[in-house]
Image (tube, helix red, strand yellow):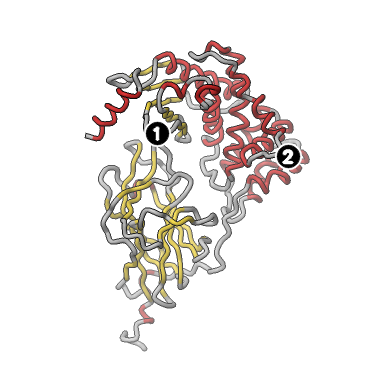
């Protein structure tokens, strides 16, 4: 019933919607679309194909052979565009009016598509970019996206877009105006830093740096040392690169300090074998969430000293492509200030697609402070992630965030995330040998 109702909205408010999805194919770009005209679908494909070619030819990046774009009309949603970090874009517009020139729509679609190509150029080489701030990641996409707009304009001209306009003004011309402003935002300052690095390393100097960062063993508590070392290892002008890094590091690096509470582990055989489950939820799923750029966290209190975390239970299900991604998600044990004590990686395959259910994740028994937080992070995209269920109980102990960052209260209830804790056999006053 929901799918029928949504189709009715499309037909009423997006007059050009089709009864079925249609596809436009170009070399290296495919657009599947509903609710917009073929002319705009072709323009989207042309923009992506041209931006991809420039990223390969001018900047030397290894881009996907084909970038797939899903373009949809949803009158209830705002205009939005994001990527899966690999080879797919997802574009949503309220109606075809959102695709008109920015002076009429307020939406910079050509720039946005180039921006996402910029993200792919980085993310395909730096899979684990959690140490980067928004200034680094979004600033890069703003910088390269602006330059790609210039290149697309040089290749395709104003006739690329069904509503022709001089979109060259949306590229580096707009970025330069932002850089000249006295109120530059974080992303603009990040773009300025990438612009400065480009002047040192040249257009084809970015790829070796990203490759080195992608292979570096980065300590999330202090990523700067590994990032700096990798940068200097691949760049001939070490003085210039070092000077640039010294200025960029405070803006680009996100440190996740570890807790002062030392992680202490014990063999499972030393525990009583009678674990206690701690929970705030009522066990009744009322909804589900996947949190991009964040995590699902719950605050707990131990029943005294000498308790150990033995397992984490999460109610949820995987979504996205049929096969689970070949990567790990993370469960962190944190102190009361949301600083990591221990990090437990698990393969994505632990969660099944389809109906949500309880998944038990056993961990090496790890000592607990009197108050602690357990957080699960899945680094989700449009094509992979985990929907974590939540209940409406609303104890106030559920949070959203990633360790080392700010934990925001989760306002909709309690995550269905529970923990199992146990004590040493020697802690039992009724046991033998006391």
Instruction: Give the structural element (helix, strand or loop) at label 1.
Output: loop
x, y percent for residue 363: 39, 61
Look at mark 2 in the image and give the residue it sits on: 241
x, y percent for residue 166: 60, 16
Task: Of the two numbered discs 2 and 1 on the same chain, state the one appearing first in sequence.
Answer: 1
Look at mark 1 in the image and give the residue it sits on: 77
Residue 424 shows in this picture: yes
Characterize the local packing of mark 2: few (<14), some (14-19) or many (20 or more) Cα atoms within 10 angstroms.
some
Instruction: Give the structural element (helix, strand or loop) at label 2.
Output: helix
Q: Does residue 205 sit above or below 345 in this rendering?
A: above
Looking at the image, which residue sits at the far left?
Answer: 1
Please give the name of the residue rendered at 24% of the width and 30% of the height, measured from the top-left corner.
Answer: 4
Please give the name of the residue rendered at 56% of the width and 30% of the height, measured from the top-left corner.
Answer: 118
Residue 88 shows in this picture: no
x, y percent for residue 220: 56, 53
Looking at the image, which residue sits at the far top?
Answer: 159
Is residue 284 found left or right of 269 in the rendered image?
left
* Nearer to the camera, 8 or 134: 8
Is residue 59 found left or right of 102 in the rendered image?
right
């Amino acid at each position: 019933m929901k799918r029928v109702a949504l189709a009715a909205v499309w037909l009423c408010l997006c007059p050009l919607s089709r009864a079925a999805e249609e596809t436009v194919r170009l070399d290296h770009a495919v657009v599947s679309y509903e609710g917009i005209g073929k002319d705009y679908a072709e323009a989207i494909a042309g923009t992506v194909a041209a931006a991809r070619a420039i990223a390969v030819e001018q900047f030397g990046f290894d881009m996907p052979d084909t970038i797939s774009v899903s373009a949809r009309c949803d009158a209830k949603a705002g205009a939005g565009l994001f990527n899966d970090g690999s080879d797919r874009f997802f574009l949503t517009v309220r109606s075809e009016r959102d695709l008109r020139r920015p002076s009429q729509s307020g939406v910079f679609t050509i720039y946005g598509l180039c921006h996402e190509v910029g993200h792919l150029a980085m993310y395909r080489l730096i899979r684990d970019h959690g140490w980067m701030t928004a200034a680094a990641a979004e600033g890069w996409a703003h910088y390269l996206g602006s330059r790609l707009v210039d290149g697309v304009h040089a290749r395709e001209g104003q006739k690329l877009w069904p509503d022709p306009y001089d979109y060259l003004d949306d590229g580096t011309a707009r970025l330069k105006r932002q850089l000249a402003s006295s109120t530059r935002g974080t992303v603009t300052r990040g773009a300025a830093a990438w612009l400065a690095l480009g002047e040192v390393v040249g257009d084809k100097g970015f790829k070796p740096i990203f490759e080195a960062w992608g292979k570096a063993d980065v300590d999330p508590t202090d990523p700067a040392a590994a990032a700096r070392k990798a940068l200097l290892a691949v760049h001939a002008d070490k003085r210039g690169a070092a000077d640039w890094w010294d200025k960029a590091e405070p803006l680009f690096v996100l440190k996740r300090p570890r807790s002062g509470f030392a992680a202490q582990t014990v063999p499972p055989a030393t525990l009583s074998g009678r674990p206690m489950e701690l929970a705030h939820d009522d066990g009744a799923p009322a909804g589900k969430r996947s949190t991009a750029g964040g995590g699902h966290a719950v605050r707990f209190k131990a029943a005294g000293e000498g308790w150990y975390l033995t397992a984490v239970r999460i109610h949820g299900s995987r979504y996205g492509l049929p096969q689970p991604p070949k990567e790990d998600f993370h469960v962190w044990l944190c102190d009361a200030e949301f600083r990591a004590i221990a990090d437990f990686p698990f393969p994505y395959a632990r969660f099944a697609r389809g109906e949500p259910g309880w998944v038990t994740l056993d961990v090496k028994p790890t000592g607990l402070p009197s108050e602690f937080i357990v957080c699960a992070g899945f680094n989700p995209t449009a094509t992979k992630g985990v929907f974590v269920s939540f209940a409406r109980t609303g104890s106030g102990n559920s949070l959203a965030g990633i360790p080392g960052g700010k934990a925001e209260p989760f306002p909709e209830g309690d995550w269905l995330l529970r923990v199992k804790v146990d004590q040493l056999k020697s802690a039992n006053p009724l046991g033998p040998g006391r």
